[in-house]
Image: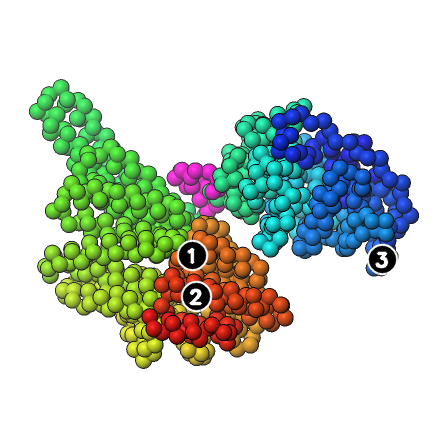
Amino acid sequence: MVKTDEDAPTQASNDSLTGNAVPLEHQVTVSASQAGKDQGPLELLPARTMPESIGDYRIIGLLGQGGMGVVWEAEQRNPRRRVALKVLRQGLLGDEVHARMFRREAETLGLLKHPSIAAIYESGTTSDGHDFLAMELVQGQTLDAWLNDQPAVLSPDDLVFRLRLFQAICGAVHYAHQKGVIHRDLKPGNIIVSRERSEGDLPALKILDFGLARIADADRQGASVLTDIGVVKGTLAYMSPEQASGEAAAIDVRTDVYALGVMLYEMLSGQRPYDLDRASIANALRSIAEASPRPLRQAWRGTKPLDVDVETIVLKALEKQPEHRYGSAAALSEDVERYLASEPIVARVPSAMYRVRKFVRRHRSSVSAAAALVLALFAAVVGTTTGLVRARRAEAEASRNAATARRAQNEASQQAQLALGTVYDVVTTADEMLQRRPETGPLRKQVLEIAMKNLEKISRDAATSGKADRTMGVALQRMGAFYEQYGTLDQTKQIYQRSLEIFERLMKEQPNEDWNPWDAAVSYDALGEFFRESGPDPGEIFGYFGRALEIRKTLVAHFRSALPEAVQRHRGLAVSGIKLANLSLDVGNPQNGRRYAEDALEAIRTAPQTDPKKARAIQEAEGSALSALACALAHLGDEPGARRRFAEAAASHEVFVKTDPLDPSGRRELGRNQQAVGVFELELGHSAEATRALEEALRIFRALAENDPSNDELVWFQANVEEDLATIHALRGDAASSRRLLESILPARERFFRSDTRNINREVELMLTKARLGDRAEASRIASHVLETAPRHPGKVFAVARALALCAESARRARDPQESAFAEKAIAALRQAAASGFKDNYAVKTSPDLAAVRGLSGYPELVAELSRR
């Protein structure tokens, strides 16, 4: 049975519906200035007499009516089909506002082509001046009516079914968001459960009534937002706090996420999170903005207790502050999927044991293979911690005797340091062993997290000796490196900052201990890498890397011994040079890139000769320094020098790989060098040579990924190589192959960006992929955001110019009149990059992405200006 307005006539068909039939007591459009006054229900005007026809449509019967209009079931004459004909009601207060909302619904639906969103066929004006929409006629029930027909008490299978159904709703909402459309009135009454079946056992869904939708696209936003200032719009029970307070500027996709949270709450409990039925509008709005939702576990109606993860997901979607909710409907759906897959959810603060329980539930059969290793870890932790506890007890017992107390305190300190050192050694061994075993990435992560928890506890209990603190700082660095590899940037930053605090304090307390500045340099480097991903200011990044470089120069100058430690310090100095060289290339300064790379090679080649194990570490750094130097020489126009250095880098990496075939880092660096060679040949227009190098790089990364499938860094490397290959296909005129490759990597690009939307590098990569796919609207939108976020980062602004030039080329192929506008914006971005310090004339002249703008006026002058720098 379909729900309609309480005072509306009975529907002509009990299972036909369009989206405007909603209970008026839940529908509100209130001026913000009136929100403090109690509002009575709005009154419907009497329904008009049923006409025989409206334009090309023969009227069959009345489907429903609401505050804005009447919905008829009609038959279109050409093409012949049944439709829902929505006609705007006249004679209302604020006719022009309602008419604009009505027309906006037509415009919004015209943007959306999704199987779970009701389609619009036609919009126009009747002969007597009424606006109308001809829409898809959906057969089915509203979601709330459909749920009322289902079992009242939910079994575990019912819970899974409803969560899957909810994910389908999230998918359609996310699609609308990707098209720039925010619904703003999501509720069960606007979702139809169809008689048809979709994938699996789920019924088909249709989302209706986009009358309050806001088009967030930059080109349309002005007209949309003007009608919203100071006005509360939506349905009270599903209204977000920012809607309730009339904050139009705060409304974005997270407003719909809130409504989805209310719906999920209702789907699982049959109730809503707030009791608003008898409240005045003012009190209802106040509850939405301030009150806490009633606990879902109390309203839950299941045969088994509600899993706390489910309630946590719902509560995160219902957060009062938008920034605390899920960032998108897709992120909400993904956390539901994690719950269904017995994986840790992102909404829950992850304890180590919680993660382990989730891992064991997912991998019962494979856990046993690594159980011995983990047990060894915990045996060491328990054993050494027990020693610490005993020592503490001995200290307390001996406190009655001053002389023995002093000895007990020393014993306690030694036991604490032993515990800390043993745990760290075991963790290091476990990490190295698991890293080389396939499919152990999740287990490796959980082992390290459990160990970190113990390390922190032992460190707090330990005597505040320099050794204990340094061990803790080094352990934090290892954990930070792991988080960095798996893309959790927030944790990476916090952990490295904590390690740096430890080493900076120790540098002051122990000025003659040179391992403290050595360790501090490692943390400076790590923070530089973090801000290289997410920082808009290159100066800040150069500051971190530069500080590490100065520390290492001092250490090398004051440590001239031929001991193995001297080799390690030379390698550290080389690493600083390599990082600064690559950062210089990032910002378009190949001259500085060459200088830093040459300094790195000097540090490597002046290192004292030592045992083969230490020589292997310097060998790895040499290959990376040679590859950075080759890239710098290429962008300075020295093609022979670049080729020679690329070949030397490959030979160095191959020696490293042969020395230890099981260590993946050598093969990874060899793959990166081959990719750099491929890009170099591509920029020169040598497609055959470029293809060979890139395919070799892709083969290396795929082989590495087979042994470590959960390693996102390897997925990222593969995506970069495949995008370069897609460019080659496009230049050869094979658009179909290019598109297939780009579409295959797009999900990874989107996932990487969603995992941390502040990561500018991931945003730039997504922008370029979208531009190559011809999604000009989305690429242009991202480009505007990058320019707004990092206006003084030469490399990021140059990437924007490339994306806009690709949009210009795409527009030319599509005969889009926006071609010239995109091209002009690309030239403007190039000028902005140059003004910010971009000096890479070679990249401007050779990048295949800029082909569409090279013939424009102003381009030769820009090239000439860069040549003089």
Residue 65 falls left or right of residue 291: right
For disc 2, the marked residue is 831
**Residue linked to disc 3:** 80
Q: Does residue 263 appear left or right of residue 338 in this picture?
A: right
CA separation, marks 3 and 1?
A: 54 Å
Q: Which residues are magenta?
A: 345-363
Q: Is residue 865 visible?
A: yes
Q: What kind of residue is marked 3?
A: Arg
Q: Secondary structure at mark 2?
A: helix
- Please name which of the two marks, 2 or 3, marks the residue nearer to the observer: 2
- Residue, far left: 403
353 inside magenta stretch: yes
Mark positioned earlier in the residue sequence (2 or 1): 1
Question: In the structure shown, which secondary structural element does the residue marked by tag 3 occupy?
Answer: loop
Name which of mark 3 and mark 1 comes first in the sequence: 3
Q: Amino acid at mark 1?
A: Pro
Q: How many angstroms separate mark 2 from mark 1 (CA)?
A: 12 Å
Q: Which mark is residue 132?
A: none
The label nearer to you, 2 versus 1, is 2
- Residue bearing mark 1: 791
Horizontal relation, residue 356 to residue 626: left or right: right
Instruction: Give the camera-side residue of 225 and 47.
Output: 225
Query: Which of 317 and 597 lies nearest the eye of the viewer?
Result: 597
Task: Tell me the residue at 61%/29% (across/down).
Answer: 285
x%, y% of residue 86?
Answer: 79, 46
Residue contact at pointers 2 and 3, CB within 8 angstroms: no
Neighbourhood count class around disc 1 (C-alpha, 10 Å): few under 14, some 14–19, many 20 upward = some
Q: Determine if the magenta segment contains residue 135.
A: no
Pointer 2 or 3: first along the chain: 3
Under mark 2, the amino acid is Arg
Mark 2 Cα shell of 10 Å, populated few (<14), some (14-19), many (≥20): many
